[in-house]
């Protein structure tokens, strides 16, 4: 199974902005689910209990998920996040497919799906 990792800014000093980052990622994740594309979304994975551990703990955990994903979808705010930049660099180094839009992901996976059948 091919899995897309969703990368983008999560944290923010402004709680309203932080909630906005989470909601944008959640909408993208929902759209992937609707069309049947497997994904991992760190924005929603630990959204309600991130305070239980250090940021390093969560970054390390997210990287373990990134390692098993085949591709990465960079949200529009990814360059504003040191974590997302590191995820991009890792993906580039390990030759993962890199997407910059939801449309690119859907087009690629639908094409892949046809080849698999």
Image: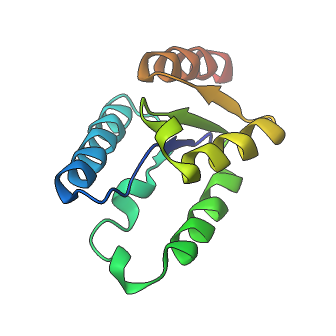
- Relative to 115, say whether 36 is above or below: below
Look at the image and tell me in which quarter the C terminus lies. top right
Residue 13 in picture, x, y percent from top left: 30, 60
Say left or right for 1 vs 90: left
Q: Position of residue 45 (x, y in %)?
A: 39, 63
Quarter occupied by the N terminus: top right
How many labels sit on residues? 0
Q: Quick check: 90 above or below 76?
A: below
Q: Residue at x 49, y 73 (%)?
A: 55
Residue at position x 42%, y 29% in the image = 76
Where residue 38 sits: x, y (%)? Answer: 48, 42
Left or right? Give the position of 32 relative to 18. Answer: right
Residue under the point 37% across and 58% down? 11
Residue 93 at x, y = what percent?
82, 40
Quarter of the image holding residue 57?
Answer: bottom right
**76 shown above or below 63:** above
Which residue appears at 67% of the width and 17% of the height? Answer: 115
The vertical placement of 54 against 41, above or below, is below
């Amino acid at each position: 199974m091919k899995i897309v990792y969703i990368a983008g800014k999560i944290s923010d000093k402004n709680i309203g902005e932080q909630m906005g980052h989470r909601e944008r990622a959640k909408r993208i994740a929902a759209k992937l689910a609707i069309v049947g594309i497997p994904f991992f979304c760190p924005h929603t994975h630990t959204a309600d209990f991130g305070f239980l551990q250090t940021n390093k703990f969560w970054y390390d955990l997210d990287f373990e998920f990134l390692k098993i994903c085949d591709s990465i979808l960079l949200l529009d705010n990814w360059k504003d996040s040191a974590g997302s930049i590191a995820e991009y660099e890792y993906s580039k180094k390990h030759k993962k497919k890199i997407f910059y839009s939801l449309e690119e992901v859907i087009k690629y996976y639908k094409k892949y799906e046809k080849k698999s059948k």
